[in-house]
Amino acid sequence: MDFCGCWCIRSEVNYIRKRDLEMKLKSIKILIPLAIVMVMFSISRLGASDGVEWSILKTLKLDAAPIDMAVSADGRRIFVLTEQGKIIVYSADAEEEATIEVGPQVDKIRLGPGGDVLISNSRENKTVQIFAVDFIQKINISDSPFKGPVDAPIVIAAFDDFQ
């Protein structure tokens, strides 16, 4: 092969390499902005908007549509009023604790400041009902010593206003 043929082949190879490099650069120039847009979109979908970061901690699945809800002052319980006329009480970790039947006419609920009073409102019946709410705490005493009958009722009184 003569010098000219060798030079022409090298020049053709260099041209192809240069063209491939230019195409890769064009692809990168297109892909980088696209990647940035995708990353920004995914970040915004994760809960960053207008300087507030947020994320969904739990989702409560209900049998009926929720109408209203209230959260206890200490944040330990969530009360959800459903269209079936039930108030479902959930713990802070989304475990169902109790159900209170109030009727389908109730359209709003609120908790008193101490969390021991639940107030329901019915526009249809033109009524407001006030409920006293006490939660029964289960205490495991299966291995504890006892005196008296096994099925004797136990009452524990907590005096939280003691001075």
Image (cartoon, rainbow, N blue to C red):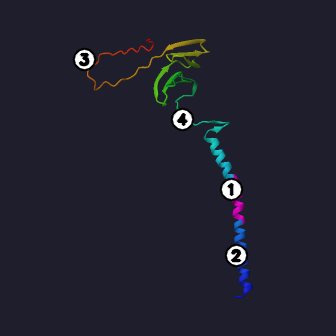
Tell me the CA gap for discs 2 and 4: 58 Å
- Mark positioned earlier in the residue sequence (3 or 1): 1
Q: What residue does disc 3 label? A: 147
Tell me the CA gap for discs 4 and 1: 34 Å
- Label the magenta part by its dominant secondary structure: helix
**Amino acid bearing label 4:** Leu
Q: What residue does disc 4 label? A: 57
Question: Do residues under tags 4 and 1 come within 8 Å of each other at their CB atoms?
Answer: no
Q: What residue does disc 1 label? A: 31
Q: Is residue 24 magenta?
A: yes
- Mark positioned earlier in the residue sequence (2 or 4): 2
Residue 15 image offset from top left, x and y in percent: 73, 73
Secondary structure of the residue carrying numbered label 1: helix
Q: Is residue 152 left or right of residue 101?
A: left
**Amino acid bearing label 2:** Val
Q: Is residue 153 left or right of residue 99?
A: left
Secondary structure of the residue carrying numbered label 4: loop
